[in-house]
Image (cartoon, rainbow, N blue to C red):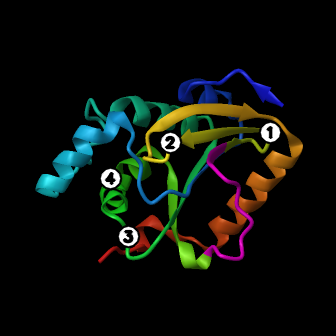
Amino acid sequence: MSQKLLDFAELLDSARHTAYHLEMRDSYAVAAEADAFARWKETGEADTDPDSPYWRPWTDLVRRTVARGVAVRRARIVSEPVSDYIRYEHAGTVVNVAAGEDVRWLPRRQASAIALPGNDFWLIDAKLVRWNHFTGSGASAPGEISTDPAAIRLCRDAFAAVWRRAIPHDEYKID
């Protein structure tokens, strides 16, 4: 069953216990990141200040969520060797961690036996799924909310399996 699409502030504000995010693409072409990604590719420098104007809306939201006792976890399944985008994302993940997210990385070859949904998602309190859709080129496409029990079960089980196998951010090294 589909419901009204919540923005990320509404989504995380609705969480009472858990907010789990699974990312499975090796490249994203999200418009809001385009300039920062281009700058990183040119200079190797990433904005890692959690209080910068770029990061502040996200870090404030995560901090507020974590302060309420919600566990915010993000798992990323990545191909190796990693893409330039994943290198960029890895460089900036210190911001997610500083805000209170627990982030782990799973090499794709270790995910072969895990039943995974077809799209990235947020799972809120094992009651609601927000599907994140992307175009073939990686641009954001309209998301979708579901409370379908089968979808929730798939996402819950997939995230748990990925999380068990994944490597904590501070231990996942990119050459």
Determine the CA span between mark 4 and mark 3. 15 Å
The disc, 4 or 3, on the residue closer to the chain's N-terminal end is 3
Q: According to the image, label 1 marks what residue?
A: 127
Q: Amino acid at mark 4?
A: Gly
Q: Nearer the viewer, residue 11 or 4?
A: 4
Q: Nearer the viewer, residue 146 or 72?
A: 146
Determine the CA span between mark 2 and mark 1. 26 Å
The disc, 4 or 1, on the residue closer to the chain's N-terminal end is 4
- Density class for disc 4 (Cα within 10 Å; few <14, some 14-19, many ≥20) is some
Q: Helix, strand or loop at disc 3?
A: loop
Q: Magenta span: helix, strand or loop, mainly?
A: loop
Determine the CA span between mark 2 and mark 3. 20 Å
Label annotation for residue 92: 4
Determine the CA span between mark 4 and mark 1. 29 Å
Mark 2 or 1, closer to the camera? 2
Label annotation for residue 135: 2
Q: Amino acid at mark 1?
A: Lys
Outermost residue on the top side: it is 4
One can see residue 47 in this view: no
- Image coordinates of residue 137 in percent, x first then y, are 43, 47
Dots 2, 3 in contact, CB < 8 A: no
Magenta residues, start to end = 111-122
Q: Helix, strand or loop at disc 1?
A: loop
Determine the CA span between mark 4 and mark 2. 23 Å
